[in-house]
Image (tube, rainbow, N blue to C red):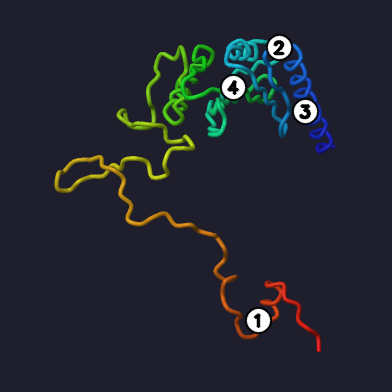
Amino acid sequence: MAEHSLTLQASRMQGQVGAMAFTLATSLPDIHMAAVEKGELVVKTTRERLLTLLTQLRDDPRYRFEQLMDLCGVDYLSRPERFDVVYNLLSVTHNHRIRVIVTTDETTPVPSVHHLWPSATWWERECYDLFGVVFSGQPDMRRILTDDGFEDFPLRKDFPLTGYEEVRYDVEKRQVVKEPVSLTQDFRDFDFVSPWEGMLTLPGDEKAHEVRQGIKRARG
């Protein structure tokens, strides 16, 4: 009985999320996509429409997404607007989640949502620090994880794996110094193949070796 009740509840919630996707896709302008992915509603919109949409999602009793759980960036290097800015919202009232996505490039700002959710300031600063996405209207647009003098943006796909500088403590100077990265050896490629697969056939293991190699033994 309990399992049946949980199944009905999950089915009802899934239906509500599907109905919400249909309503958003058909009633609001500039919605590029509204669909259910793995039980979660995903909406893609424009930068110009972003604030209006998020305000409605927060305040409309049908939605009531009171909490901004996360704001993050994704870099698709080959696209003209290479960055996705992703807003993950939670409705405590209705126990629903939604992901809102807008795109931008290296220079075009995205409207800040710190006045809708004060916690957004931390997330927007992080997104700026790591991806270089600028948020217009954000009163505290500073780096938050890297050093104040840090250049470039570490989570961009074209940022080198080694970085540009390394920080270490110099015993002779008795201070922390910055210097260009110097690797003691080049990067190595690892194929992650089990070393046992590359071994020669051990005595008594001939049959297993043939199976691994796809060799058919002739029957005599």
Residue ID for mark 3: 14
Q: What element carries label 2?
A: loop
Give the label on residue 28, or none.
Answer: 2
Q: Distance between the residues labelled 2 and 3?
A: 21 Å
Q: How far apart are marks 4 and 2 (CA)?
A: 15 Å
Q: Position of residue 172 (x, y in %)?
A: 14, 48
Residue ID for mark 1: 205
Specify few, some or many for label 4: CA neighbours under 10 Å numbering under 14, 14-19, or 20 or more.
Answer: many
Q: What type is the residue that disc 1 sits on?
A: Asp
Q: What type is the residue that disc 2 sits on?
A: Leu
Q: What element carries label 1?
A: loop
Looking at the image, do the residues carrying marks 2 and 1 touch, with CB atoms under 8 Å apart? no
Q: Position of residue 151 (x, y in %)?
A: 35, 31
Residue ID for mark 4: 102
Quadrant in the picture for the N terminus: top right
Give the label on residue 178, or none.
Answer: none
